[in-house]
Amino acid sequence: MRCFTVTESRVTSSIEIEPTPYPHIAVGESGRGRELTRFPVGLRFANSLAYQKPCFRRGEQMYHEVCPECSMKCTSIPGSTYFRHPEEGKITYYSPVERASVLKTREKGTFLLIEEQDPADHRALVLVNIAAGFRGGTEWTGAVSDEAPCPYWGEEVWSKFCPRCKTLCFPIEGTEKYQHPEGGTIPQWTIFPPSGIITLAQGCKAQGAAGRMGGHVVRLLLMEPGTSFRVHRTGRLYGAPVERFVFWDGETLHLGTQDEVWPPSCEMPEGELI
């Protein structure tokens, strides 16, 4: 099956493999207010993706007796507390994964990324890293909604137009408030994950050193053809879209606003000219 990485602005037809402490897909990040989940890559598959480059610390002075990048032993510099990296040593990298299969181990029931076993598998493995706005968060739902009554029906609000359903409200005499009429609806989205989508791993990323300035969930998903979901973004977006819809049709992974992912039909409908 094909592999994709999705951010708030683009779709990439591959997933990056992190080399340490073992080959894995990083879902989220480590640190305060964050969560990192490592989705392991099978050893044989990882070896087929591996390649090496010369260590970029060659010839440098460093505090470490053993290079943290390539594990080469460094030599002590006389009269100094530093060590010198030798002119050798290589770092192992891994090519991004474009096609793969997921194995559920028989002994522990854990998941493992392996080489593709069935080229006819039209599901998609998708690493979703859709960020929130500054000091904001994200909410995941299905991509289908029904209309539900606005929760502010008959309530007092502080704006001329309802902040939820955008219905025109009436000023309340003698106050700066407005009365919400008995009308107005809001979309009621289905829950995540919808049928046909499986969450294989989950982590989170955050803003700020303490992780308290906002953040977002990162998920590794297995998507059947025809499935979709929605991510609602809050915080300061500076003109970027609030909603991101993701739809896998079995051939292409679509990302965009609702009308970009499912554009209106261009066929000539029946009707009367005005």
Image (spheres, helix red, strand yellow):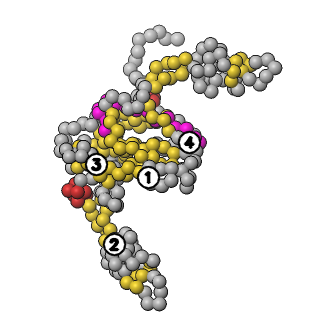
Closer to viewer: mark 2 or mark 3 = 2
Q: Which of marks 1 and 4 is nearer the N terminus?
A: 1
Mark 1 touches mark 4? (CB < 8 Å): no
**50 sits left or right of 190 in the view:** left
- Residues under labels 2 and 3: Cα distance? 29 Å
Stretch in magenta: 222-238
- Residues under labels 1 and 4: Cα distance? 17 Å
Q: In which quarter of the image is the N terminus?
A: top left
Per the image, the residue denoted by label 1 is: 29
Q: Earlier in the sequence, mark 2 or mark 1?
A: 1
Q: In this view, does 40 lie above or below 233?
A: below
Mark on residue 71?
2
- The quadrant in which residue 163 appears is top right
Q: Is residue 274 above or below residue 142?
A: above
Residue at the location (40% across, 85% down)? 76
Q: Is mark 2 on a helix, strand or loop?
A: loop
Tell whether position 171 is magenta: no
Residue at the location (30% across, 45% down)? 3
Q: How crowded is mark 3: few (under 14 residues within 10 Å), some or many (20 or more)?
A: some
Tell whether position 224 is magenta: yes
Residue at the location (55% across, 45% down)? 214
Kindly identify the amino acid type of the residue bearing the numbered disc 3: Glu
Per the image, the residue denoted by label 3 is: 98
Q: Is mark 3 on a helix, strand or loop?
A: loop
Q: Residue furthest front?
A: 107
